Image: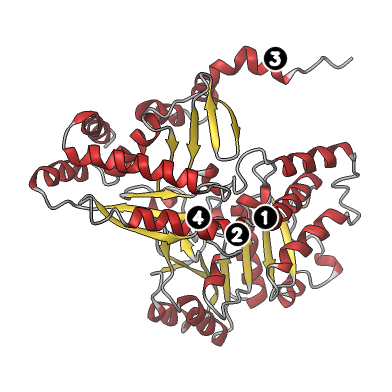
């Protein structure tokens, strides 16, 4: 007889050990880092754009699980879809039939991508990128894919080969023979294409690292160059897609851009079941799957599983019913404009940029002598410490979760759930203003914490 499994009892008995369990059995540096910066919170529950701790304090989520929680946490429509699909007891993943849910989700995705024809479902963003890399190479018969400096396309080996950040790549060579070009540099792209071995260019329309937009006209011009050289344009919309930037895809901000392959993931999951998708043109798929002998030449064990497909269908339905794309546009414009208005007020605040609800706040060298000395101290120890100094009091004092946008960057990235509104904008701007006031006062606990970060950075060298 099967021993009864009681998840609630297990969590009640062992939940308090969460940090010790991670330190003992998982990535031991994660709890160490969280303890160091004071992020070692214990969240009891979550809903929408908020978490709550055991004392009932609410925390505003401006991170959305790195973009996974596009609809916020535990959306009732997605929850119901998952209950329904489990209760249906479908004959899932038989491998030798065609279930309806994958076809229905592909149909809905392609409605938003009218120039594309087919979809491959995997399990994550990096797998969607891996699929695009393989399909581009096979369809063109060429070995090399170009990517943009500072890009992030995932951490599996193929995706890592088009990752523009050395900190992720170091120690994992040899990688694939791919080549970086500066974002927006058409001359560099043209020079690489002239070599005749380029399968395609993969690009984030807005880079997650630093929140840098592709320059106006770049994607269209790059597409024309690529097609002239019989190479493909691959749009990585894993973070920017599904409404994040105020359009369904970020590449749609530029007229005439029709990528040959598009990668999506993150928000398509509803925050529940991992899912990734690679959308592409008919001729590419037909070249890869050119015969019955090649029917399984590219597949995924858990790809197209019923739970993921149900979650994806529910997400797209909610996006349409609740107009989340429009909300991302209007709320994002409000948040960005209110933050941009602070640039002239604070000398440590350099720039506010981004689209929709993907916003970067960059800090820079102040003019006043007193602040400049403190800034120089932080920069000498490790670039990015001031941004961390802002992120910590936003959580500790104002209960707002944010992130530094990348290693060695003085940029905070805001990617909240697409359901946030004016109330959340008010709360964030008021808290951010208070933190910047404290930073510019030149004293207090914030700069004491900065000295702690400096000591930690020096000790880790």
Front label number (1 vs 3): 1
Query: Do we see residue 369 in this rendering?
Result: yes
243 is higher (above) or lower (below) than 307:
below
Residue at mark 3? 9
* In this rendering, position of residue 447 left or right of residue 124: left
Label 3 SS:
helix
Give the image location of residue 238, x and y in percent: 58, 57
Q: Pointers 1 and 3 in contact (CB under 8 A)?
A: no
Task: Characterize the local packing of mark 3: few (<14), some (14-19) or many (20 or more) Cα atoms within 10 angstroms.
Answer: few
Task: Give the residue displayed 21% in from the left and 33% down from the top.
Answer: 447
Q: CA distance from mark 3 to mark 2?
A: 40 Å
Q: Is residue 199 above or below residue 375?
A: below
Give the mark nearest the N terminus, 3 or 2: 3
- Residue of label 1: 319
Task: Read off the residue under disc 2.
Answer: 325
How much space separates mark 1 and mark 3, taking CA atoms?
Answer: 36 Å
Write the residue at 49% across / 79% down.
222
Q: Is disc 1 in contact with disc 2, using a CB cutoff of under 8 Å? A: yes
Q: Which mark is residue 401?
A: none
- Give the CA separation, mark 2 to mark 4: 10 Å
In the image, 298: left or right of 148? right
N-term-proximal mark, 1 vs 2: 1
Residue sitting nearer the eye, 348 or 382: 348
The residue beneath circle 4 is 331
Front label number (3 vs 4)? 4
The residue furthest left is: 369
Q: How is the image coloured?
A: secondary structure
Callout in the foreground (1, 4)? 4
Label 2 secondary element:
helix
Answer with the quarter of the image where residue 236 lies: bottom right
Residue 196 in the image, given as x and y percentages of width and height: 52, 82
């Amino acid at each position: 007889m099967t021993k009864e499994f009681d998840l609630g009892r297990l969590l009640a008995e062992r939940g308090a050990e969460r940090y010790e369990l991670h330190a003992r059995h998982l990535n031991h540096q994660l709890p160490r880092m969280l303890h160091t910066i004071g992020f070692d919170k214990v969240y009891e529950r979550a809903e929408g754009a908020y978490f709550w701790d055991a004392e009932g304090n609410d925390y505003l989520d401006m991170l959305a699980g790195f973009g996974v929680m596009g609809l916020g946490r535990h959306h009732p429509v997605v929850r119901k879809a998952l209950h329904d699909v489990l209760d249906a007891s479908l004959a899932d993943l038989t491998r030798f039939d065609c279930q309806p849910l994958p076809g229905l989700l592909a149909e809905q995705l392609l409605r938003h991508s009218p120039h594309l024809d087919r979809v491959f479902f995997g399990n994550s963003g990096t797998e969607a990128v891996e699929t695009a890399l393989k399909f581009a190479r096979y369809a063109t018969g060429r070995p090399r894919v170009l990517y943009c400096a500072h890009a992030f396309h995932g951490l599996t080996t193929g995706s890592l080969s088009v990752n523009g950040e050395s900190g992720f790549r170091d120690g994992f060579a040899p990688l694939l023979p791919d080549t970086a070009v500066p974002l927006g540099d058409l001359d560099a792209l043209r020079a690489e294409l002239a070599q005749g071995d380029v399968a395609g260019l993969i690009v984030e329309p807005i880079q997650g690292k630093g929140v840098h937009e592709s320059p106006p006209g770049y994607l269209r011009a790059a597409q024309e160059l690529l097609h002239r050289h019989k190479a493909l344009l691959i749009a990585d919309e894993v973070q920017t897609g599904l409404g994040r930037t105020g359009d369904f895809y970020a590449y749609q901000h530029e007229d005439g851009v029709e990528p040959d392959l598009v990668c999506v993931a993150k928000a398509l999951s509803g925050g529940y079941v991992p899912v990734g998708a690679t959308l592409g043109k008919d001729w590419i798929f037909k070249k890869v799957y050119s015969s019955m002998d090649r029917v399984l030449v590219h597949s995924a064990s858990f790809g197209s599983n019923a739970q993921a497909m149900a979650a994806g269908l529910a997400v797209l339905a909610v996006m349409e019913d609740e107009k989340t794309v429009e909300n991302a546009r209007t709320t994002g414009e409000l948040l960005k404009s209110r933050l941009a208005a602070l640039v002239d007020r604070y000398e440590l605040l350099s720039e506010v940029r981004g689209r929709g609800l993907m916003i970067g706040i960059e800090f820079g060298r102040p003019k006043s002598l007193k602040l400049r000395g403190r800034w120089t101290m932080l920069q000498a120890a490790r670039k990015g410490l001031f941004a961390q100094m802002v992120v910590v009091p936003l959580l500790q004092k104002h209960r707002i979760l944010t992130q530094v946008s990348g290693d060695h960057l003085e940029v905070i990235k805001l990617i909240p759930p697409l359901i946030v509104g004016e109330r959340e904008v008010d709360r964030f701007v008021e808290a951010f203003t208070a933190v910047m006031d404290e930073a510019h006062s030149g004293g207090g606990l914030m700069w004491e914490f900065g000295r702690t970060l400096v000591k930690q950075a020096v000790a880790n060298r």
